[in-house]
Image (cartoon, rainbow, N blue to C red):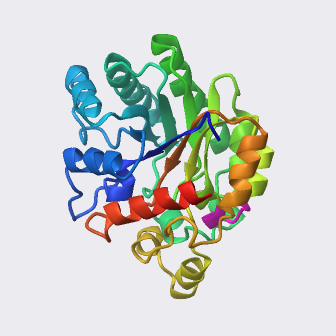
Amino acid sequence: MKNIKIANAPCSWGALEFDLEAEAPGYKQVIREIAETGYAGTELGDWGFMPTDPSRLKEELGHEGLDLLGAFVPVDFSDAGSHAAGVENALRVAGLMHGAGFPDAFIVLADNNGSVPERTRNAGRIRPEQGLGDAQWKIFASGAEKVARAVKEQYGMPSVFHHHCAGYVETPGELEMLMQLTDPELLGLCFDTGHYAYGGGDPLEGLKRWRHRIRHVHFKDYSARVGAAAQENGWDYFEAVKNGVFCELGKGEVDFPAVMRFLEETAYNGWIVVEQDVLPGMGSPKICALNNRKYLTGL
């Protein structure tokens, strides 16, 4: 896969968009360890995790030899009253990345995951009646398009949507609905293998179904053993993550050799971002990042 570059992201070090008690490592440590473990780029992380001055951000990433390929921007799209704030936040993030010299970076849009108790509590086992109604779907989709359009018009930068457990776009059916309701010229897809598996889908089938919309790929593995334990014990999303539902690559259920073959056969030439979501202070992120990089090299 000669045209594909491999990145990692701050979420693999516990730097998440959620308001959690424990503290994640600082950005200097994170980007240094991303570079030291063999990755070529990083995502931005939550606003304020890395420098918000474009010149300083460019300098810090350049010091480690890393590209910046995107930033995660969660928005409560099911609430029309939150759309304007979503546009403002996305433009702020896009302006930072553009000003730092990364005009091709993605705005990775997502629901405001973890904010709806019923969805957070039932992540990985969502029932249809726990989803959005038709009118809510139209509000959700129009909000996503509104944000993506604003970013495109002001900065010429692409937007993709990240389906994610503990949000309203988790299951294959929910992703299908959003993709059908949105303009592919405005909104691409960030396909996450681990979230698709935990949400009840087959990642390879999902890649095949949505290859025409996929602009960005997250490599994340999924432990069916932990997923089953979450269902048996009634764990919410965060408890499942704490117990390792997203494990090291090659130790879960995602068929990465088949995924890699498919991406190569279909001439995918974007970034692959390795993500092993952990809570702050959990595990040994640098060791996991190195093991994940070695696994991909072995493929």
- Residue 202 x/y as whole percent: 74, 62
Q: Could you say which is closer to the camera, residue 24 or residue 119?
A: 24
Q: Which residues are magenta?
A: 197-202
Q: How many marks?
A: 0
271 shown above or below 175: above
104 shown above or below 67: above
Location of the C terminus (image quadrant)? bottom right
Horizontally, residue 267 falls left or right of residue 292, namely: right
- Residue 210 x/y as whole percent: 75, 42
Residue at x-position 73% and y-position 35%: 267
Q: Could you say which is closer to the camera, residue 25 or residue 91?
A: 25
Residue at x-position 49% and y-position 59%: 294
Location of the N terminus (image quadrant)? top right
Horizontally, residue 204 falls left or right of residue 193, namely: right
186 shown above or below 116: above
Q: Could you say which is closer to the camera, residue 57 or residue 298?
A: 298
